[in-house]
Amino acid sequence: MSDQGVTGQGPSGLYLFFYKTKKSLKTPMPYLAFVGIGLWLLTYFLLNEYWKVFPFYKLPGPVEVVTEWISSDPIWGTSLFTEDYYINIWVSCRRIFFSFVLATGLGVPLGLFMGWSRKFKDYTFPVLETLRPIPILAWVPLAIVMFAGFETPIIFLATLASFFVTALNTMLGVESIDESYFRAAGCLGSKRRHVFIHVVVPGSLPFIFTGLQISIGVGWFSLVAAEMISGDFGLGYMIMASYMVNKYTTMVMAMLTLGFVGWITSAMVRAAGNRMMQWREKALGQGGA
Amino acid sequence: MNTASAPSVPNPLAGAMTTGAISIRNVTKVYDPGGVNVLAVEDCSLEIAPGEVCMIVGPSGCGKTTLLNAIAGFHSITSGQIDLDGEMLCGPSKPLADQGADRVVVFQNGALFPWKTLVDNVAYGPVVQGTMTKTEARDKAVEMLVEAGLSNVAGKYPGEVSSGMARRAEIVRALINNPKVLLLDEPYRAMDGLTKSIMHESLLEVYDRTKVTIFFITHDLEEAIFLGDRVIVMTTRPARTKKIVDVKIERPRDYRLLSSEEFRVLVEETKEAVHEEAVKAFEAGERELA
């Protein structure tokens, strides 16, 4: 017997994507997003260029920033048309990628074992809780002492921040799993490793992905902080370097770029989570738990 | 009809069964949350014949589930012994029974894995026990789900189907392991009357086909009499058997039974015993709070 005929019959693949896009255009969501951004830009414009309210008039205005951003011959040397803009984005993204992969690769297994084994938690939790509240900025000198060059200390700092968030959320994820799933697995003849693979891991995924979304955000915070203090490229470096030489327009441009890139990375994590937790999406889509 | 420790089960089909006999002897369970001893079950004895449908009723929190947890291996017992087919599950030397697929539990709120489709849920047991390959288990699971009238939803996740269908699939997930005993802990509690009656008929259908021993906890007396060979009325905490009602109604049973005189008499008889205990439990509860 095959699965054909027993699986769901709705649209799938590309059709499902079109269907969803079409449906979402019928909701107010995308329009409200535009209105929101528009209102924000308008407020910025009014405060900064029109009414010139203190302290906002000290900022570079939206018109000025956008003109510089899309200029093929930027006054301050950086725009969508210059190479160094992309180098900075690329370098930051590469660092985030490495640190996110490292933090996830270390944090998820650690959290899973902490949630799963009481004994393991007793060993590790006090250490984790002691190190976790130390702000990333406090680690900067140590990172510079420990690692040579620009790249390793920055990746270390971004990894560290993400790691704690991921480990903690994963642990809470395991602890959130209803006891009856463990019991069900037990009375169906599972060995310990089956329980781990079939209950602990999938059951904690919702928490893990909540954690990963926060972790990638925290990763950006600490990355930029690290790049501002010690760096040669990257968006954080771009912000700091522009500030040093009074290129405020470029600075605001870098900040907005950072926000936008950060948003995209979070959305990617969210999409990956939804893909791995179809059971949850489908249940939610039906108005279930 | 009254309290008896060694019952002769009036199930005409019981003679054909050789496995699934549960023997509960002088079982006591003491919990000590925060250092205060709570006697959940005291000196409880009960013999369940192979292939019997044994219904356990009693006031809320009386220790029925404690008994089920001891048989399933979720909780230890303090003293006494529980055997399955003459082999000790738990006893003086081993207070906690091993969990195993010969005694599968169907849970009060349902415990299908929400991250697996119904097919994969059902196929889970044989795969982890290593008795079937993944493909064999899935084929068998689909076959059994079709048999249970779940062919349309077999590929769906539990969150996508109704609670009735989910519960039915959970029973299929138990049966694929050929368990000796099915342990049900108020599985239909949260359901409306109509769904419940459909669930009862499908459980009876399953029972008539498999003749598996059923240990079924419920608050619903009509459910108890309709499904059971015997109804065990438990006392309020600490739980002991207060009264055993033999249900000598022939199988297969169907819904016409509910309006028969014979059925109503049995319900009345059970209700009296349960009511007495419920009042005691309620008053005990009030005193504790005051």
Image (cartoon, coloured by chain):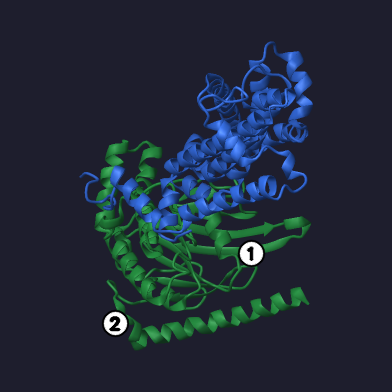
Label 2, secondary structure: give it.
Answer: helix
- The residue at which mark 1 appears reads as B42
Residue at the far bottom in the pictured view:
B261
A52 vs B75, nearest the viewer: A52
Above or below: residue B114 compared with residue B49: above
- Is residue A205 shown left or right of residue B129? right
Residue at 60%, 50% in the rendered image: A42
Q: Position of residue B103 (x, y in %)?
A: 44, 52
- Identify residue type, mark 2: Arg
Q: Using a 10 Å C-alpha cutoff, classify the residue at mark 2 as few (fewer than 14 neighbours), some (14 to 19) or many (20 or more).
A: few
**Mark 1 / mark 2, whichever is N-terminal:** 1
* Dot 1 and dot 2 residues touching (CB under 8 Å): no
Q: In this view, does A71 lie above or below B207?
A: above
Q: How crowded is mark 1: few (under 14 residues within 10 Å), some or many (20 or more)?
A: many
- The image quarter containing residue A213 is top right
Can the viewer see residue A81 in this picture?
Answer: yes
Colour chain A appears in: blue
Q: Which residue is drawn at 37% across and 39% down?
A: B127
Residue that label 2 marks: B256
- Asked if badge 1 and badge 2 are on a common chain, one would say yes
Letter of the chain that mark 1 sits on in the rendering = B
In the image, what residue type sits under mark 1? Glu
**Which chain is drawn using green?**
B
- A243 vs A282, nearest the viewer: A243
Left or right relative to A223: residue A81: left
Residue B249: x and y in percent read 33, 77
- Residue toward you, A169 or A268: A268
